[in-house]
Image (cartoon, rainbow, N blue to C red):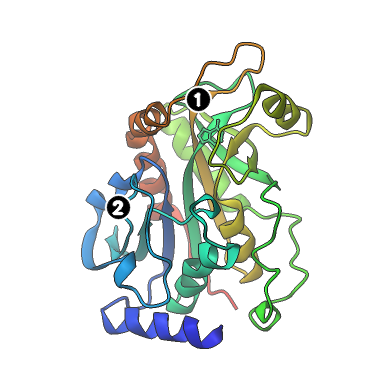
Amino acid sequence: MIKALEETTEFLQARGFEDPELGIILGTGLGKLVDELEIIAEVSYNHIPGFPTATVEFHKGKLIYGKLDDKKVVVMQGRFHIYEGYTLWDVTFPVRVMKRLGIKKLLVSNAAGAINPEFKKGEIMLIDDHINLQGGSPLAFRGVEHLGTRFTDMSEPYDQESGRIMQEIAKENNITLHKGVYASVVGPQLETRAEYRYLKIIGADAVGMSTVPEVIVANHLGIPVAAVSVLTDECDPDDLQPVDIYDIIQAAGKAEPQMITLFRELIKRIELKPVS
Ligand code: HPA
């Protein structure tokens, strides 16, 4: 386990991924932030030893190292999901590698369905808390206890300071930024009306198929994490419209300029403190 992490880290360091300060995971339809980067190095996931092989056709599947406003960043353009057949260890392996490369903070984006009826398609939600409905933990693997505390505290899984700054940025730029609870499901099927009703009752504001495993591992490693969802469809169980994955991707793409503003400005303004 540790050997695999070391091998991947050394491979990337040898290709120029030197001391990134910040890790960024870009979700569905949100890959364009990389156009803002001064790219120094990039490698396709399927050329990185130890990485799961990228299969989701909508993602480009590349790890990119570069500079953004003088901060050294490592960007995952596309992520791994358990619905592709990967384990929760595989899905979160890149977060562990990014920590070994040196990141001090992690920023995460995703596409999600809006459960809260006040939240509309195309709007953005800052994730303030989550509910793990993926039926497993990325920490429930043999040997993980050597990589961090086993009983990881999750009383405040999302970095409050980054959230506050993002709300400030949203206000200055007239971006609607909700704040809420993200529920993660396995997918890849979308939810039934009964499931959307259930998600609302248990306190979810949005639902998606990612992010929570990465956030759990970031907490395990002591890396502060900020995450935002683009709301790509409205999940009203009493008036449910069939959803098409291409609609979801298109809706995510439409919100992309606002997501880029939020992330870019946040990267400019955040202070990066050393993590243990
Ligand atoms: N459900 C689950 N995942 C999603 C959805 C949804 O409605 N929309 C985008 N990702």
Q: Is residue 103 visible?
A: no
Give residue 66's quadrant in the image: bottom left
Q: Disc 2 residue type?
A: Lys
Q: Is residue 212 above or below residue 100?
A: above
Q: In this view, does 17 lie above or below 238?
A: below
Q: Distance between the residues labelled 1 and 2?
A: 23 Å
Report the front residue among 173 and 215: 215
Judge from the rendering whether residue 3 lies leftward or rightward of residue 30; answer left or right: right
**x and y, in percent, of residue 132 in the image:** 69, 49
| Residue occupying the point 47% across, 74% down | 97
Judge from the rendering whether residue 133 lies leftward or rightward of residue 61; answer left or right: right
Residue at mark 2:
60
Q: Earlier in the sequence, mark 1 or mark 2?
A: 2
Mark 1 Cβ and ligand 1 under 8 Å apart = yes
Q: In the rendering, which numbered label is found on residue 62?
A: none
Mark 2 Cβ and ligand 1 under 8 Å apart = no
Assess disc 2: are there few (<14), some (14-19) or many (≥20) residues with their C-alpha within 10 Å of its C-alpha.
some
Position of the C terminus, as image quadrant, is bottom right
**x and y, in percent, of residue 46 in the image:** 32, 67
Q: Is residue 168 visible?
A: yes
Residue at mark 1:
233
| Residue occupying the point 47% across, 46% down | 109
Query: What count of labels does the image hold?
Result: 2
State yes or no: discs 1 and 2 in contact (Cβ < 8 Å). no
Residue reaching furthest to the bottom = 3
Report the front residue among 269 and 137: 137
